């Protein structure tokens, strides 16, 4: 490269552009920062290692699942502006594995030239379920009717049970969501900014994982079906592919692609859906990161959702999403009534079953309904995979010493 000393300012700018062009997205010289060090980050790092992508994590928990896998691990608050800003300012790219992060710090980093994926403006919408719902309404995306409220007193004055109430921010893993069945439940109303949704008598809960890179290329995974644990309000089983008609599959795929494109989103997005008894697809909510409803892709699909997230935020070619084998995913939850050092009962018995794959998240302590891992069962016959999965659920228990 020839340096023009008479026009030094423009030459320096050209040098920076040239350096950016030749910088690799792999190896120790490229610093990918991740906000959050939980199990999603752990599985992301496990896939990123295959491409020598160096991941640096920030998490408030010293013994988070990513602590011993990340290239560097920083203990600190994800909500504190200075902590997030100082963590991010020496990174080439910032991503997340949890939505509850300081958006203002990410916006400042982005304004200073640091790439943030998903983009802060999309995180601001998704982090607040009220803004999510308004986004759907403004963009003609199908969702259940809703109202926004600031306090429980407003809900009592305006709503009649039954309905669904959701906290606008801070909810996760089934927390911050409740069904108000009758006026007798009004004493349990969330007294904080919330959404009230019409209670939809749905036939199935579905999910589509979709990825989009900076070039605007998109790809989605076949629709999956979720079965929930009613007590914990967490996914207990996931079935891939969903047992739905080709017409419903096409409708679910269209809705997911519409969402990711209208958001102008970069990264991987989980689009959780209701299939109503009338055959209509409605958006429940979305998650701007790898998601519980995509864990089966590690063994069940050609490209895992974690590798796909890496590909999309680095603006790389997106991977094929074809199903290798039908699969069932089981969330491994802490057994009710147990708290302390985790002990896995039945793990060796599970390992003796062909087609069964365990993923333990490295959490040393268990408690009731805590996500401790997941198991994926693959089989050419989905019905046989379901039978194996229900058998595993019956004997694999997370207890404590």
Image (cartoon, rainbow, N blue to C red):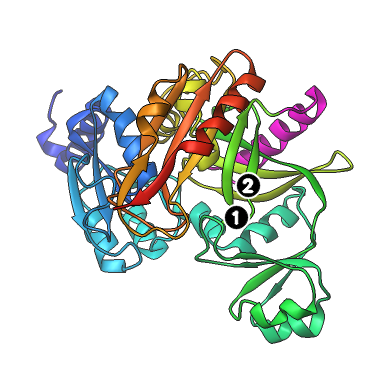
Q: Quadrant of residue 165?
A: bottom right
**Residue at the left extreme of this rendering:** 5
As drawn, the label of residue 228 is: 2
Between 399 and 94, the one lying in front of the other is 399
Q: CA distance from mark 1 to mark 2?
A: 6 Å
Marked residue nearer the N-terminal end (1 or 2): 2
State the image coordinates of residue 180 (x, y, percent, origin top left). 73, 70
State the image coordinates of residue 76 (x, y, percent, origin top left). 24, 62
Secondary structure mainly formed by the magenta segment? helix
Q: Residue at x 50, y 41 (%)?
A: 331
In this picture, which residue range is highlighted in magenta? 243-266
As drawn, the label of residue 233 is: 1
**Residue at the right extreme of this rendering:** 278
User: Does 69 appear in magenta?
Assistant: no
Question: Compared with residue 89, is residue 328 higher up or lower down, i.e. above or below?
Answer: above
Q: Residues within 10 Å of mark 1 (few under 14, many from 20)?
A: some
User: Does 245 appear in magenta?
Assistant: yes
Q: Is residue 350 visible?
A: yes
Q: Residues within 10 Å of mark 2 (few under 14, many from 20)?
A: some
Q: Secondary structure at mark 2?
A: strand
Q: Is residue 314 visible?
A: no
313 sits left or right of 169 in the view: left
Q: Residue at x 60, y 75 (%)?
A: 193
State the image coordinates of residue 73 (x, y, percent, origin top left). 19, 49
Question: Compared with residue 108, is residue 143 higher up or lower down, i.e. above or below?
Answer: above
State the image coordinates of residue 395 (x, y, percent, origin top left). 48, 37
Tag 1 and tag 2, C-beta contact below 8 Å: yes
Between 269 and 42, the one lying in front of the other is 42
Question: Compared with residue 244, is residue 264 higher up or lower down, i.e. above or below?
Answer: below
Q: How many marks?
A: 2
Which image quarter is the N terminus in? Answer: top left
């Amino acid at each position: 490269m020839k340096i023009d000393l008479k026009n030094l300012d423009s030459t320096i700018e050209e040098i920076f552009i040239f350096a950016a062009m030749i910088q690799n997205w792999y190896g120790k010289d490229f610093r990918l920062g991740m906000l959050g060090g939980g199990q999603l980050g752990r599985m992301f790092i496990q896939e990123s290692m295959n491409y020598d992508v160096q991941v640096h994590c920030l998490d408030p928990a010293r013994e988070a699942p990513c602590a011993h896998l990340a290239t560097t691990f920083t203990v600190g608050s994800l909500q504190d502006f200075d902590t997030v800003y100082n963590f991010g300012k020496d990174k080439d790219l910032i991503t997340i594995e949890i939505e509850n992060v300081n958006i203002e710090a990410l916006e400042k980093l982005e304004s200073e030239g640091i790439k943030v994926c998903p983009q802060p403006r999309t995180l601001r919408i998704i982090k607040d379920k009220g803004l999510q719902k308004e986004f759907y309404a403004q963009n003609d995306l199908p969702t259940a009717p809703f109202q926004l409220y600031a306090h429980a007193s407003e809900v009592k004055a305006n709503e009649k049970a039954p309905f669904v109430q959701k906290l606008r921010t801070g909810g996760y893993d089934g927390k911050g969501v409740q069904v108000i069945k009758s006026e007798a439940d009004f004493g349990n109303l969330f007294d904080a900014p919330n959404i009230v949704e019409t209670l939809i008598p749905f036939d199935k809960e579905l999910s589509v994982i979709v990825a989009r890179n900076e070039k605007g290329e998109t790809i989605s995974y076949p629709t999956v079906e979720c079965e929930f644990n009613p007590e914990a309000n967490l996914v207990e089983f996931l079935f891939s592919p969903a047992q739905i008609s080709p017409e419903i599959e096409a409708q679910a795929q269209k809705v997911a692609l519409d969402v990711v494109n209208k958001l102008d989103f970069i990264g991987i997005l989980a689009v959780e859906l209701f299939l109503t008894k009338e055959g209509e697809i409605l958006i429940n909510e979305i998650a701007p990161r790898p998601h519980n409803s995509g864990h089966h892709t590690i063994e069940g699909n050609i490209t895992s959702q974690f590798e796909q997230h890496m590909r999309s935020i680095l603006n790389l070619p997106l991977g094929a999403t074809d199903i290798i084998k039908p699969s069932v995913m089981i969330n491994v939850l802490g057994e009710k009534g147990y708290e302390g050092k985790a002990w896995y009962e039945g793990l060796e018995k599970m390992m003796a079953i062909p087609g069964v794959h365990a993923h333990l998240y490295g959490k040393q302590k268990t408690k009731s309904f805590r996500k401790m891992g997941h198991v994926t069962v693959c089989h050419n016959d989905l019905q046989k995979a379901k039978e194996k999965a229900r058998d595993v659920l019956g004997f694999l228990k997370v207890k404590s010493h």
